[in-house]
Amino acid sequence: GILADISVALADMKVYILQINTMKDSNENDIVDIKVSCKNVEHYHSIVSRLKSIKGVVDVTRGFS
C-alpha cells in the first residue's frame, strides 16, 4: 500500500525514481529508501512536503550514498 502511494505521488509530480530499497529496522518498522531525480532545492522541498503528507510516512530525510 504505502509504496504504491509513494510511487503515485512521485509520478504525479513527474519525479523520476532512480532506485528503491526496502528493509526493516530493529523494531520491525519498514524503511523505504528511494533515490529520485531532483531539479533544485525548491523541487526537493516540494517532494519532501508531498511525501510527508502521505498517510503512514513518518519521516523523509535527505541522504547521499
Image (cartoon, helix red, strand yellow):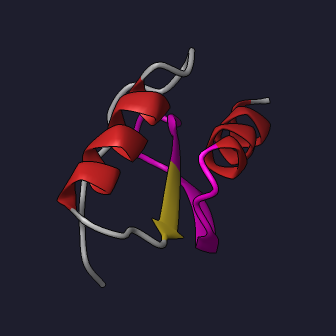
Residue drawn 48% across the image and 70% down it: 35
Number of on-image labels: 0
Query: In this view of the protein, which residue sits in the foreground, 27 or 50?
Result: 50
**From what the image shows, is residue 48 above or below residue 34?**
above
For the record, the magenta segment spans 13-31
Give yes or no for residue 28 being in the magenta stretch: yes
Q: Which quadrant of the rendered structure holds the C terminus?
A: bottom left
Q: Please identify the residue farthest to the top as the structure is shown.
A: 55
Residue plotted at (47% across, 73% down): 37
Q: Is residue 5 magenta?
A: no
In percent of width and height, residue 21 lies at 60, 67
Left or right position of 41 against 46: left
Residue at the outermost bottom position: 65
Q: Position of residue 1 (x, y in %)?
A: 80, 29
- For the residue pair 3 and 10, the one nearer the viewer reads as 10
Q: Position of residue 38 (x, y in %)?
A: 39, 68
Question: To which quarter of the image does residue 19 belong?
Answer: bottom right
The residue at 56%/57% (across/down) is 23
User: Where's residue 17, x and y in %?
Assistant: 62, 68
Give whichever of 13, 22 is nearer the camera. Answer: 13
Seen in the image, is 49 located left or right of residue 9? left
Q: Which residue lies most toward the left here? A: 41
Q: Is residue 10 above or below residue 14?
A: above
- For the point 49% across and 60% down, which residue is it? 33
Image-based side of 50 in relation to 42, left or right: right
